[in-house]
Image (cartoon, rainbow, N blue to C red):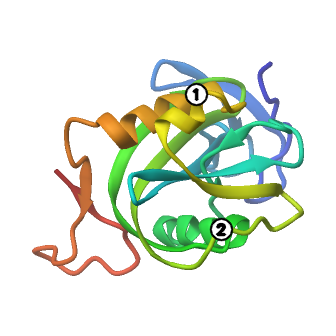
Amino acid sequence: MEVEVNYCSSCGGRMEIREIDGTPRSACTACSFVHWGSYSIGVGALVKRDDKLLLVRRAQNPGKGYWTNPGGYIEQLEPIEETIVREVMEESGIEAVVTGVAALRDQPRSIHNVYIAFAMDYVGGEPRPDDVEVDAAGFFSLEEMADMNVAPFTRWLADVAFRGQSRGLLKDGAPIVTLDGLGLFRV
């Protein structure tokens, strides 16, 4: 399903379809605004403690009843690494810090979804569900997960967390130039 944009979000003018960069796109008839597409960015946490991975059980759809890694969607003005720290705390009561990017899922569809899984270090707390989005939380080994209702994508992420071949993209804590407001990661 293609999302149709009828009015400009910049000036309110009517939109029309024009070929821009070889692709039909919605463009404003009154100003220079171009609707480049609809996107969502999700984040997920891979928090390990004592060779076990933090999982939460979804209390709402989509995914009700499935065990997944904690996560959510970024807010418009929230730095992405703050989003994942917040989501982990909200859903599980666990304090964790980002150490790197462990995996990425690209899902082109009507609203193109990109999901970034962050490797995180456990800092403190005991797992407790928020009883809104999730109704259970805990740390589990791969062996324990084998008998649980773990979502397929989360099974893949658990494999990344336990059997990953690299340290992934790491946060650049001292970039060669100051770029305020940007989260910079490098190999």
> Which SS class for mark 1?
loop
> Which SS class for mark 2?
loop
* Badge 1 density bin: few <14, some 14–19, many ≥20, Cα 10 Å: few
**Pointers 1 and 2 in contact (CB under 8 A)?**
no
* Amino acid at circle 2: Pro
* Badge 2 density bin: few <14, some 14–19, many ≥20, Cα 10 Å: many
Label 2: which residue?
A: 127
Question: Closest to the observer: 184 or 119?
Answer: 119
Residue 54 as seen in the image, left or right of residue 12: left
Q: Give percent across and percent down for residue 80.
A: 50, 64
- Give the residue displayed 60% in from the left and 48% down from the top: 69
Residue 100 as seen in the image, left or right of residue 59: left
- Give the residue displayed 54% in from the left and 42% down from the top: 115
* Amino acid at circle 1: Ala
Question: Closest to the observer: 7 or 55?
Answer: 55
- Give the residue displayed 50% in from the left and 71% down from the top: 79
| Between discs 1 and 2, the one toward the N terminus | 2
- Give the residue displayed 59% in from the left and 73% down from the top: 94
Determine whether 104 is above or below 138 in the image.
Answer: above
Label 1: which residue?
A: 146
Residue 179 as seen in the image, left or right of residue 18: left
